[in-house]
Amino acid sequence: MLFDAHTHLNYEEFSEEERLDRAREIEESDVEFIIDVGDSVESSEQAIKDAADYSWCYAAVGIHPDKALTYSDDDIDKIKELASAPKVQAIGEIGLDFHYGKDSKAEQIELFRKQIRIANELMMPIMIHTREADALTRDILIEEGAFSEERKAHFPERPDGQGEMVADARVQLHCYSGSLELAREYVKLGATFSIGGPLTFKNARKTVEVLEGIPLQFIMSETDAPFLAPEPKRGRPNKTPYIEHVVRRMALLKDIGFDEAVRITSENARRFFNIEVL
Ligand SMILES: [Zn+2]
């Protein structure tokens, strides 16, 4: 059964009817679990509500770097409070976006640091959004202790795909678009990747290189719906059930069966987000 490790059922522009439609489509699909990711206090609250409404929905709470000029310290306190709500499995999405946020770099860095500290204090998984800030994102994660020995000792080890168990700092790079070289460095640090629609795009060279160069044990599947729809749905609003196209491409590139790709990516996500299957 498929796992969408990063999606926005909480999307603030959905009407209640649209949200119900998206939920019904997920229930009718082969998707077993989703992580409903917040990007503001309000959307994080909606994600918690969604998680209460649907057994297959879990939440992540956080403030996106695009709010760096508008958030308040009360919002940070609120995120910390929300992080303890039932079925909140991670802090995210947090990070740096220097593609859109050229004028708020200092504020983004501060907001990012504050939320990594919350995740460390509560010992929670972290979901990272990073765009045109690859090296700085890595440096800040290291400086703030996201890959600390304390975190790695707290979370159980994971298989490395080659028969060994390795440390896991429970840091997920969402929609990873950096180089294979940096990806290998991140794996050594204890990070995990989540890859979505861009893997299916014609110009996906870098994402394909990462997928081919990193064992699938370090990769989860995601949609980032309603954004970034995969081929053959590209250009339309994305939906969680379209994740099948992403995992089919992963299976093709890894030269394994679709069912095995589903099994491995779902296991990775369940382990990362502490979701037991009874
Ligand atoms: Zn997202």
Image (cartoon, rainbow, N blue to C red):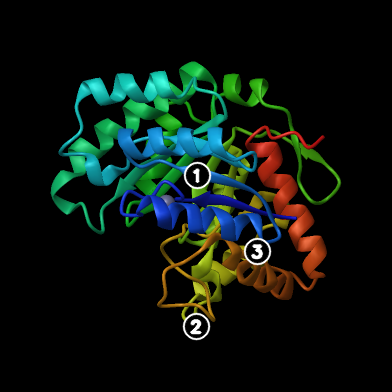
Closer to viewer: mark 2 or mark 1: 1
Residue 202 - label: 2
Residue 36 - label: 1
Q: Is residue 8 above or below residue 146?
A: below
Q: Looking at numbered disc 2 in the image, what kind of residue is underneath it?
A: Lys
Q: CA distance from mark 3 to mark 2?
A: 19 Å
Which image quarter is the N terminus in?
A: bottom right
Left or right: 9 as drawn, with respect to 132: right
Residue 271 - label: none
Nearer the observer, 222 or 184: 222
Nearer the observer, 250 or 6: 6
Mark 2, Cα crowd under 10 Å, few <14 / some 14-19 / many 20+, is few
Instruction: Name the residue at 79% across, 55% down.
Output: 263
Nearer the observer, 126 or 70: 70
Q: Is residue 251 above or below residue 178?
A: below
Residue 159 coordinates in the image, percent (x, y): 78, 42
Comes first in the chain, label 2 or label 1: 1
* SS of the residue under disc 1: strand
Q: Which residue is mark 3?
A: 213
Q: Taking the image as drawn, is residue 180 in sight? A: yes
Comes first in the chain, label 3 or label 2: 2
Q: Looking at numbered disc 3 in the image, what kind of residue is underneath it?
A: Gly
Mark 3, Cα crowd under 10 Å, few <14 / some 14-19 / many 20+, is some
Comes first in the chain, label 1 or label 3: 1
Q: Is residue 60 above or below residue 24?
A: above
Q: CA distance from mark 2 to mark 1?
A: 28 Å
